[in-house]
Amino acid sequence: MTHNNQKKIAVINDISGFGRCSITVAMPIISAMKLQCCPVPTSIFSNHTGYPHYFFDDYTVKMPEYIENWKRLDLEFEGIYSGFLGSREQIDIVRSFIRDFKTERTVVIVDPIMGDHGKAYTTYTKQMCQEMKRLTEYADILTPNLTEACILTDTPYSDRHWTMKELISMAESIRKEGPEKIVITGIRQGDFVANLVYEAGEEPRILRSHRVGSERAGTGDVFSSIIAADAVNQVPFAQSVKKAGNFVKKCILRSEELNIPRPDGVCFEEYLTTLR
């Protein structure tokens, strides 16, 4: 008996019971895209940390035994996708997971969640940022926002207009560390938001759309979950980035219509059936 007749993605991230982010986002989106989503929880939250109070349970010490039982089942994955990691130990566990489970047909997607708006998150010390840089060496696809791209390349962050040349230079620097495909997200250009699509052997592209609504929790998780599923489904990278960006935009607009509070994220459930 084999457990590997259906394509699967292992998603290594936290679980937030309320507030659409991390595994709570990845599972329905990846499932809607006809892949089995297998979560590896790094921690459990009642709701994410953007709310005034929350329950938190760290799963770091439980992760090795959890993963060991997957090895005993001889599980194989077409995708491995990691999101927010809260400690050096968790980053080490993810590296080991990739080494143990990656095969010739496995694509590794790393969302190097470290910061936003020009600043690293308070949990991300310089040492943690260095550890995340080491993790990117294992990635086939990397999905940093502009802040994270700056951290990964030791580039000073600025709110100014970034030129195409500067963005490509950062992507090329990241490419040298390992990833074949990189999308730098959330680049503000006046009334537009842009994503730089960089793929080894292809001409870099900027995909832009009008900024809509307000910033919301979990939109990066929605975006990267689509990228991960599309990668396993062998959708061309630029096409996938465009699809993910359009989907997030559509969900933001609908969330504004329904007056969904910003911490609650985007009501992607309204459009799940449109994902293929």
Image: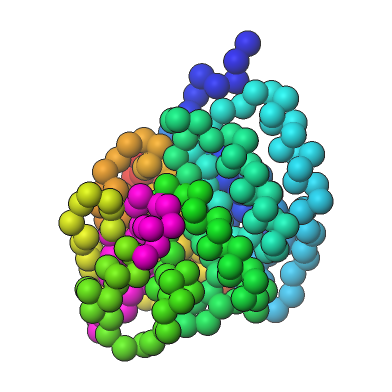
Q: Is residue 246 above or below residue 101?
A: below
Q: Is residue 255 above or below residue 211?
A: above
Seen at 55% across and 21% down, the residue is 4
**Segment colored magenta:** 173-197
Residue placed most toward the observer, 29 or 166: 166
* 192 is within the stretch colored magenta: yes
Seen at 48% across and 44% down, the residue is 108
Color scheme of the displayed model: rainbow
Seen at 37% across and 58% down, the residue is 175
* 63 is within the stretch colored magenta: no
Q: Is residue 13 above or below residue 97?
A: below
Q: Quadrant of the C terminus?
A: top left
Q: Position of residue 258 (x, y in %)?
A: 44, 67
Residue placed most toward the observer, 114 or 20: 114
Q: Is residue 27 left or right of residue 73?
A: left
Q: Position of residue 99 (x, y in %)?
A: 59, 39
